Image (tube, rainbow, N blue to C red):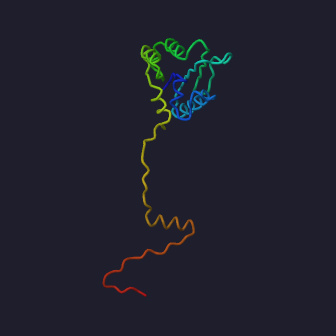
């Protein structure tokens, strides 16, 4: 799947990240790289307020990070990208909880996912069903084998007395 991500909109929805952190954008890019590697996704992430001289595109494997210069916004850049994609926008999912970004995505017939929903998707491991671990007791043969491996001996199991038989002393 291909995603257009409103980066500063997503950051507050991921545990351990916040807009007040100095490296929040770089940390988000790392997490997006991991997300892409797990399931062959492609991501374009947009960040507002690039410092002077820092605006532009930086490539990080399957993640393209766009740092939008001051005076423009990531929202505007995402809307322009959707227009440039034309009919191909239908093959993309826009990630933002911003209503104007969602409206632009819907107008382009792109899929829309809130930042909260995408954060949950990022944290989920694809392809692994949620299964509770169940404790399964070992059978006596397995126990004996483990004890043999680790050098301990176990007393032979006591059998209940058979009625009418005398026990050896």
Q: Return the residue found at the far right.
A: 53
Q: Return the residue found at the far left.
A: 164
Residue 4 placed where, x, y %? 51, 21
Whether residue 84 sits left or right of residue 134 in the image: it is: right
Dividing the picture into quarters, in which one does residue 50 lie? Answer: top right
- The residue at 57%/31% (across/down) is 33
Quarter of the image with the C terminus is bottom left
Residue 60 placed where, x, y %? 62, 26
Residue 55 placed where, x, y %? 64, 17
- The residue at 36%/87% (across/down) is 166
Dividing the picture into quarters, in which one does residue 138 lie? Answer: bottom left
Whether residue 155 sits left or right of residue 163 in the image: it is: right
Residue 116 placed where, x, y %? 46, 29
Task: Identify whether 131 is placed above or below 111.
Answer: below
- The residue at 46%/75% (across/down) is 156
Task: Identify whether 39 is placed above or below 5.
Answer: below
- The residue at 31%/85% (across/down) is 164
Task: Identify whether 130 is placed above or below 122.
Answer: below
Task: Identify whether 169 is placed above or below 152.
Answer: below
* Badge count: 0
């Amino acid at each position: 799947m291909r995603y257009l991500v409103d980066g500063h909109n997503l950051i507050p929805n991921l545990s351990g990240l916040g807009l007040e952190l100095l490296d929040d954008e770089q940390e988000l890019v790392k997490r997006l790289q991991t997300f892409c590697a797990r399931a062959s996704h492609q991501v374009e992430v947009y960040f507002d307020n690039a410092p002077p001289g820092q605006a532009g595109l930086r490539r990080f494997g399957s993640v393209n990070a766009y740092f939008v210069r001051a005076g423009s916004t990531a929202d505007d850049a995402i809307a322009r990208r959707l227009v440039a994609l034309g009919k191909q926008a239908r093959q993309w999912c826009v990630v933002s909880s911003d209503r104007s970004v969602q409206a632009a995505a819907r107008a382009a017939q792109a899929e829309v996912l809130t930042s909260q929903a995408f954060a949950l998707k990022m944290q989920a491991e694809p392809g692994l069903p949620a299964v509770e671990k169940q404790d399964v007791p070992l059978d006596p043969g397995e126990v004996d084998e483990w004890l043999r491996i680790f050098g301990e001996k176990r007393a032979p199991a006591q059998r209940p007395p058979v009625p009418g038989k005398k026990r050896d002393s």
